[in-house]
Amino acid sequence: MKTAIFPTISNPPTFGVILSLRYVEKLYEKIYVCVEDKPRVLNTDKIVHLLSVALGKDNLKYAVISNKADFTELTILPTKLPKFDDILTDNPRVYSNLIGKGYQNVVLIPKPLGWDETFHRVAYNRSTLYEKVMNDIRTSNNPEKYVKDYMK
């Protein structure tokens, strides 16, 4: 049984991650998606849940886990990771770090056409901020007080 681990930040998860995994999923019987446990926009548990749903809750090919390891900088792989044959990544920084540290089983997989990591994170941050602002405005029973409090 050939297995792989796919370290990812996915904060927030995007279609790019899912499409990248779909490119190579037929090559492996099991793929562990390892979310970096470093909350940025969303907490790690939420990311694990979202990726589990997106990759198919009942799909036995994928297991979504989390670990504090930053694969762009680590030297030694964490011992608590499940056993795997290959390390998959769509991140050139992860790839170059691990190849540079002597790991031979690292596979750089393609990102989907038109993918721009920064754009998606910025767009997500802006949309959540917009949603928060709209919720605050809609729930305000006293707009004058809201503006006065905001000006303080």
Image: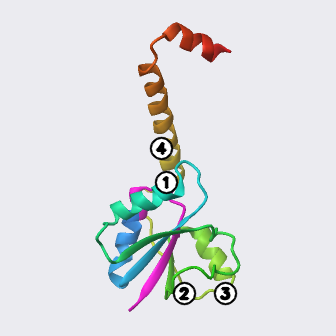
Cα separation, mark 1 vs mark 2, equals 26 Å
Which is nearer the N-term, disc 4 or disc 3? 3
Q: Which residue is mark 2?
A: 105
Which is nearer the N-term, disc 2 or disc 4? 2
Cα separation, mark 4 vs mark 3, equals 36 Å
Q: Which residue is mark 1?
A: 116
Q: Residues within 10 Å of mark 1 (few under 14, many from 20)?
A: few
- Mark nearest the camera among 1 and 2 is 2
Which is nearer the N-term, disc 1 or disc 3? 3
Viewer-side residue, 37 vs 90: 37
Tag 1 secondary structure:
loop
Image height check: is 42 above or below 6? above
Image height check: is 63 above or below 4? above
Placement of the N terminus among the 4 image quadrants:
bottom left
Q: Residue at x 40, y 57 (%)?
A: 50
Q: Residue at x 48, y 52 (%)?
A: 12
Image height check: is 47 above or below 82? above
Figure label count: 4
Q: Mark 1 and 2 residues: CB-CB less than 8 Å, in contact?
A: no
Cα separation, mark 4 vs mark 1, equals 13 Å
Residue 26 is left or right of residue 112, and the answer is left
Tag 4 secondary structure:
helix
Amino acid at dot 4: Tyr
Image height check: is 141 above or below 121? above
Amino acid at dot 1: Asp
Q: Position of residue 24 (x, y in %)?
A: 38, 77
Q: Position of residue 79 (x, y in %)?
A: 62, 82
Cα separation, mark 2 vs mark 4, equals 33 Å
Tag 2 secondary structure:
loop
